[in-house]
Amino acid sequence: MSDDQNRQFFFDRPVEQLSVLPKAKKLRKPLTVTGGVLIGAMVGSLLGGGIAVGGYYLGTSPTPVVVNNSLEVNWVSGASQKALPSVVTINVGSSTSGGSGSGVFLTADGYILTNTHVVTLDGQAKNPTVEVQTFDKRTYSATVIGTDPINDLAVIKIDSPMSFTPIAFADSSSLNIGDSVVAIGSPLGLTASVTVGVVSALNRTIAVANSSVPGENGSGLQLWNGKGAAPVSLRVIQTDAAINPGNSGGALVNSKGALVGINVAIASTGSSSSTAQSGNIGVGFSIPSNVAKRVADEIIKTGAATHALLGAMVTDQPFNANSSSSFSIGALIKEVTVGGPAESSGLKAGDLVTKFNGEPIMDAGDLTAAVRWEAAKTQATLEFVRDGKTQTMTVTLGTLK
């Protein structure tokens, strides 16, 4: 197995925590082991004369960003000032465990976008207790509206007459490598933390473990070497902005404070054991805002998200088919489903898919993740090689069920 295959991608979730949930007054178990301890805010009595109706309010309302010298304010301060009111900390508890992550407000009436692995405690909790704390320390109960384990996104909602500040969405398809970005969330329980970096890569496919998702036989997904969880291929933005456990579900914003991604995972140089997870090493990943918005809108509308289906079993194609080359040059179609979109469009076993909607496809994981990005019943353009000749076709994708 190559060094690349040995790399590990971990959901950026926190470790040891004290519960803030009324029914879980115990030390929270770690989701994964990293350096750092999160101490939850202990919520006491309602303060502030009813300012935070439906929640708890601790102390006076702070400003989003502390500015001590207005003459030295830079773009990071401005972007943070814009986005911070839309970013929240999420604490999740079940009868046996607990965890914490981040999220962003989608609407003024309390819909929040986060990761599936945050609200399900990596698939361990089916009916969790969820609490949300806003940047100004108001705390509310929240309900899970729906989850999308395929893209690791989820929507929860606060039931409150308060009006919240929804995040502004940017067009993630307009990103360039080298663009400046800011990651905002609650790494290791340090709420409203801001880190800065650049977009390191676009359309990067990673395989992560998500026990909320069943395995896909014959999908050609890169195998996950963790324990007890099926692999999921995600096509993501790579950034060197520091992302750590607890940043999951938080915002990656551009220089104007608009959302370009939802932070989801970090890379680690540790061993295959999940207990060896390290903190930030400058390689973090975010789900593009265009995908996040499409999924969030569908969950709010119907409670679930749709996913496209190509109807083909694919595998990697080695650069040199006569050797055990570690480089792949496309997704090789091994079999097409009878009556499926691939067969109906004329794709055949042996075709080598090299582009999907104009983006390069280097292996089976790339193609799987690219297809899952799309909504059901959408059209896609495929470039493939058959008998040594490059061809292009338009495929009407099906519905993954």
Image: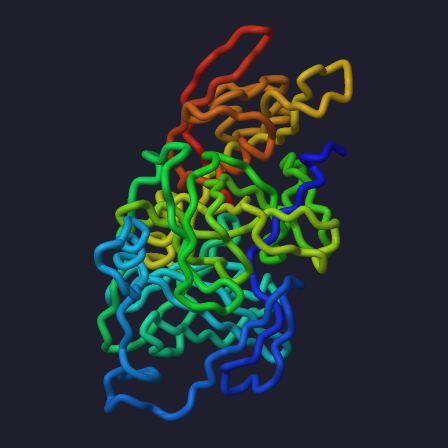
Residue visible at 26% across and 70% down? Answer: 63
Closer to the camera in the image, 206 or 43: 43
> Which residue is outermost to the top?
388
Residue visible at 54% across and 37% down? Answer: 205
Which quarter of the rendered picture does the N terminus lie within?
A: top right
Residue visible at 48% across and 12% down? Answer: 391
The number of numbered discs placed on residues in the rendered structure image is 0
Q: Is residue 350 left or right of residue 344?
A: right
Q: Is residue 113 above or below residue 217?
A: below
Residue 361: give x, y in percent of width and height: 53, 26
Residue 223: quadrant of the picture: top right
Residue 389: give x, y in percent of width and height: 54, 6
Q: In this figure, which colouring scheme has been used for the structure? A: rainbow
Residue 278: give x, y in percent of width and height: 64, 55
Q: Is residue 273 above or below residue 40?
A: above
Residue visible at 34% across and 59% down? Answer: 300
Residue 82: give x, y in percent of width and height: 26, 57
Q: Is residue 43 above or below residue 146?
A: below
Residue 321: quadrant of the picture: top right
